[in-house]
Image (cartoon, rainbow, N blue to C red):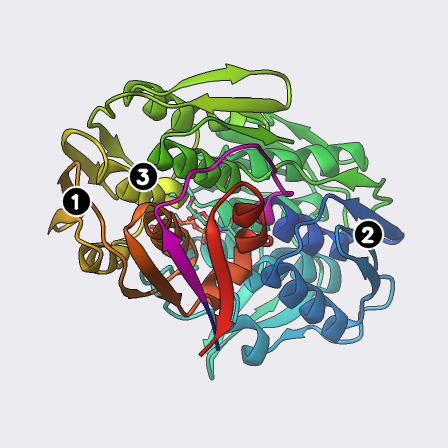
C-alpha cells in the first residue's frame, strides 16, 4: 500500500492548475446513460472514482475511450441493469446510476452503498422520490430493486433534507419521465447546476436552474443527443490549495478556478486575515502576519462546504486564539481530529463541534487517512509540521485528488509517495 512521506516545514510558491471537479464529473458521466450518441466530456479529473464509475458503465454495456482528461462514452447498447456490490462498495457515488438507469430501462438493481467512514449516508430520499414518480422499490439481499415498467411519471418531490446526489438522481430520472417534475428543496451546488445546464443544452426544458426549486419537463423516454461539454473546475481541490498556502503563509496562484464557486471559502479566509487577487479564472492568495481565529458551520451550498471542514480545521491550528467548527452534515466527520492531535494540535471535540486553540507548532508523526478530505488535511498539516510526517492509507486521496503529491512538489513541498 502507498503512503506519503512529507518533510516539513516547507514553503510554497508558484502556480497550481486546478483539475475538473470530481463531484461534477460523476453525475455527468452517469447522465450519459440517457444519451443515444457518443458523448465527449473534457476536463475530466484523473482520479480513481472516475475510473470506478467508467468500469460500472462498461459493465452495464457502455463502450468508451478514456484519454486522461477526456472521455468519449457510448451507451447505445445497455446489456445489464445491475450495479453490483463489488463496484458500489468501493464508491458510494455509484448510486448515481439508479435514476438514469431506471428512467431509461424501466427497471434496475443497484447495490445499497452501505455505511461509510463519515457516517451512515442513507439513500432513503432518493428512493422515496423515485416511488413518488411511480417506481416500485423493494430492498432485499443488499440490493435496491426498482421497477417502472411504463416509465417514470412526473411528480412534485419535496426533499426533507437537501441532498446532492439525491437531487442529481431525480433530475436525471425526471429528464426521461412522462410529464413535469417539480423538485422543492433541491441542492444548489455548482455540480448540480452543471448537470441541469448540460441536460438543458440537450433539449430538456428545466426551469429554476441554480435555485432550490427545479421544474423539469420530461421527454417520455426519448434518449438524448448530448453535445460535448467541459467539466467545471474543482472548488474543493482549489480550496485545499488555498488552505495549504494559508498554512505555510505564502502567496500562491490557482489557475482554472471559478472564484464565484469559492465565495464561502475565500470569505472565511478573508475573515482570518488573508487577501486575494481575483480574476475571471485565476486567483492568488496572499499571506497575513497573524492568522485570526474563526467560527465555521458547515452547510449546503452556497454556505461553507463540509468537504472543506477538515482542511480548515488544520488551518485553525495556526490561528492565534480559539476557533470553532461545527459539522452539520455528517455525524462522524471528525476522524482527522485524533490524527491532527498526534501531530500536536490542540483540538477539543464536543459532539459535532470542534474547538481549536492555536497557534500550535506541529511535529511530524505517522498518521492515518480516514476519508478523502480528512486525508488532505493531514497532508497540509504535514507540510508545516517539523520533521517527517507519514500519511498512510492514501487510497482515499487517490479517489479524489489528481496528482496531489506532484502538484504539491511542483510548488515547493517536500513530499514523496512510497510503498509500505
Ligand atoms: C455529496 C458529495 C460529497 C459532499 C456531500 C455534501 C458527491 C459525489 N459527493 O455527497 O462530497 O460531502 O454531497 O455536500 O457529490 N441524506 C439522507 N438521506 C438521503 C440522502 C442524504 O438522510 O437519501 C443526508 C446525508 O446523510 C447527509 C445529508 O443528507 O447528512 C447530505 O448528504 P448528500 O448531500 O446526499 O451527500 P452526498 O450526495 O452523498
Residue wearing tag 1:
354
Q: Helix, strand, or loop for circle 1?
A: strand
User: Marks 2 and 3: in contact by CB < 8 Å?
Assistant: no
Residue at the image position 87 percent from the left and 54 percent from the top? 36
For this view, does 287 lie left or right of residue 155? left
Estimate the spatial distance between the alpha carbons at disc 3 and disc 1, rounded to whole Å. 11 Å
Tell me if residue 14 is in the magenta stretch.
yes
Q: Is residue 111 visible?
A: no
Q: Helix, strand, or loop for circle 3?
A: helix
Residue 165 image point, x, y percent = 52, 50
Dividing the picture into quadrants, the one containing residue 319 is top left
Q: Is mark 3 within 8 Å of ligand 1?
A: no
For this view, does 162 lie left or right of residue 317? right
Q: Give me the disc on residue 35.
A: 2
Span of residues in magenta: 4-23
Q: Nearer the viewer, residue 124 or 416?
A: 416
Residue 288 image point, x, y percent = 32, 21
Tell me if residue 384 is in the magenta stretch.
no
User: Marks 1 and 3: in contact by CB < 8 Å?
Assistant: no
Residue wearing tag 3:
312
Labels 3, 2: front one: 3
Residue at the image position 35 percent from the left and 43 percent from the top? 311
Residue 171 image point, x, y percent = 61, 43
Q: Nearer the viewer, residue 33 or 282?
A: 282
- The earlier-in-sequence mark between 1 and 2 is 2
Position of residue 4 relative to residue 315, above or below, is: below
- The earlier-in-sequence mark between 3 and 1 is 3
Q: Is residue 19 visible?
A: yes
Amino acid at each position: 500500500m502507498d503512503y506519503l512521506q512529507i518533510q516539513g516545514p516547507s514553503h510554497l510558491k508558484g502556480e497550481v492548475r486546478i483539475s475538473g471537479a470530481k463531484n461534477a464529473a460523476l453525475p455527468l458521466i452517469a447522465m450519459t446513460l440517457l444519451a443515444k450518441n457518443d458523448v465527449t466530456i473534457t476536463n475530466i479529473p484523473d482520479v480513481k472514482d472516475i475510473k470506478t464509475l467508467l468500469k460500472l458503465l462498461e459493465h452495464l454495456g457502455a463502450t468508451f475511450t478514456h484519454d486522461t482528461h477526456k472521455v468519449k462514452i457510448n451507451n447505445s447498447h445497455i446489456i445489464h441493469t445491475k450495479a453490483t456490490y463489488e463496484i458500489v462498495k468501493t464508491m458510494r457515488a455509484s448510486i448515481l446510476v439508479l435514476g438514469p438507469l431506471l428512467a431509461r430501462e424501466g427497471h434496475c438493481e443497484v447495490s445499497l452503498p452501505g455505511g461509510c467512514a463519515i457516517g451512515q449516508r442513507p439513500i432513503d430520499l432518493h428512493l422515496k422520490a423515485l416511488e413518488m414518480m411511480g417506481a416500485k422499490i423493494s430492498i432485499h439481499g443488499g440490493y435496491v430493486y426498482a421497477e417502472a415498467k411504463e416509465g417514470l411519471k412526473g411528480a412534485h418531490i419535496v426533499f426533507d433534507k437537501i441532498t446532492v446526489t439525491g437531487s442529481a438522481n431525480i433530475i436525471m430520472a425526471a429528464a426521461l419521465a412522462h410529464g413535469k417534475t417539480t423538485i422543492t428543496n433541491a441542492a444548489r451546488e455548482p455540480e448540480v447546476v452543471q448537470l441541469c445546464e448540460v441536460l438543458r443544452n440537450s433539449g430538456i426544458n428545466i426551469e429554476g436552474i441554480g435555485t432550490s426549486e427545479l421544474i423539469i419537463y420530461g421527454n417520455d423516454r426519448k434518449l438524448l443527443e448530448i453535445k460535448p461539454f467541459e467539466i467545471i473546475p474543482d472548488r474543493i481541490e482549489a480550496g485545499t490549495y488555498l488552505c495549504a498556502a494559508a498554512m505555510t503563509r505564502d502567496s500562491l496562484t490557482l489557475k482554472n478556478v471559478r472564484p464565484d464557486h469559492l465565495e464561502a471559502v475565500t470569505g472565511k479566509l478573508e475573515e482570518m486575515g488573508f487577501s486575494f487577487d481575483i480574476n475571471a479564472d485565476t486567483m492568488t492568495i496572499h499571506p497575513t502576519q497573524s492568522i485570526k481565529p474563526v467560527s465555521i458551520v458547515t452547510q449546503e451550498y452556497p454556505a461553507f462546504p463540509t468537504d472543506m471542514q477538515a482542511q480548515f480545521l488544520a488551518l485553525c491550528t495556526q490561528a492565534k486564539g480559539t476557533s470553532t467548527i461545527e459539522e452539520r452534515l455528517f455525524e462522524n466527520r471528525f476522524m482527522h481530529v485524533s490524527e491532527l492531535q498526534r501531530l500536536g494540535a490542540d483540538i477539543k471535540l464536543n459532539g459535532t463541534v470542534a474547538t481549536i486553540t492555536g497557534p500550535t507548532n506541529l511535529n511530524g508523526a505517522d498518521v492515518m487517512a480516514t476519508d478523502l478530505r480528512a486525508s488532505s488535511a493531514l497532508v497540509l498539516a504535514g507540510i508545516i509540521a517539523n520533521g517527517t510526517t507519514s500519511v498512510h492509507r492514501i487510497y482515499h486521496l487517490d479517489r479524489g485528488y489528481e496528482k496531489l503529491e506532484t502538484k504539491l512538489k511542483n510548488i515547493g513541498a517536500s513530499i514523496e509517495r512510497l510503498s509500505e
